[in-house]
Image (cartoon, helix red, strand yellow):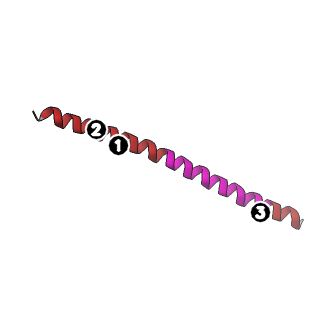
Amino acid sequence: MKRKRSSERVFQTTFSVSGICFAVSGILRFAAWFLQVVCLIINILIRMQRNRTP
């Protein structure tokens, strides 16, 4: 019984660690996508301002 409990604990800890890593990777992917969108918007605004000023 003790061995099963210890193995279950190890499984839970490894599962939580993998879940945290998966969440972090997802957040990093979202942050990279968000930064790309922000850069595109900034570039569009700069182009609009350049076109307005002769």
For the point 60% across and 49% down, which residue is it? 22
Give the main secondary structure, helix, strand or loop, of the magenta stretch.
helix
Q: Is residue 13 magenta?
A: yes
The answer to which image quadrant residue 14 occupies is: bottom right
Q: Is the C-beta separation of discs 1 and 2 under 8 Å? A: no
| Quarter that holds the C terminus | top left
Give the residue furthest to the right.
Answer: 1
**Residue 2 percent location from the top left of the image:** 87, 67
Q: Position of residue 52 (x, y in %)?
A: 13, 33
Question: Which corner quadrant holds the N terminus?
Answer: bottom right
Disc 3 marks which residue?
Answer: 9
**Quick one: label 3 or label 2, which is nearer the N terminus?**
3
Tag 2: residue type? Asn
* Residue at 64% over, 53% down: 19
Q: Which residues are magenta?
A: 8-29
Q: Amino acid at mark 1?
A: Val
Residue lying furthest bottom: 2
> Residue, x 23% and y 39% (percent of image)?
46
Crowd band around label 2 with a 10 angstrom C-alpha radius: few (<14), some (14–19), many (20+): few
The correct choice, above or below, for 22 with respect to 41 in the image is below
Specify whether 48 is left or right of 26: left
From the viewer's perspective, tell me whether residue 31 is left or right of residue 25.
Answer: left
Q: Disc 1 to disc 2, how far (Cα)? A: 9 Å
- Of residue 27 and residue 5, the one placed in the foreground of this image is 27
* Residue 25 in the image: above or below residue 11: above
Mark 1, residue position = 38
How far across and down, in percent of the image, does residue 10 sit? 77, 61
Q: Residues within 10 Å of mark 3 (few under 14, many from 20)?
A: few
Q: Which residue in the structure is indicated by mark 2?
A: 43
Q: Earlier in the sequence, mark 1 or mark 2?
A: 1
For badge 3, the amino acid type reads Arg
Mark 3–mark 2 distance (CA, rounded to whole Å)? 51 Å
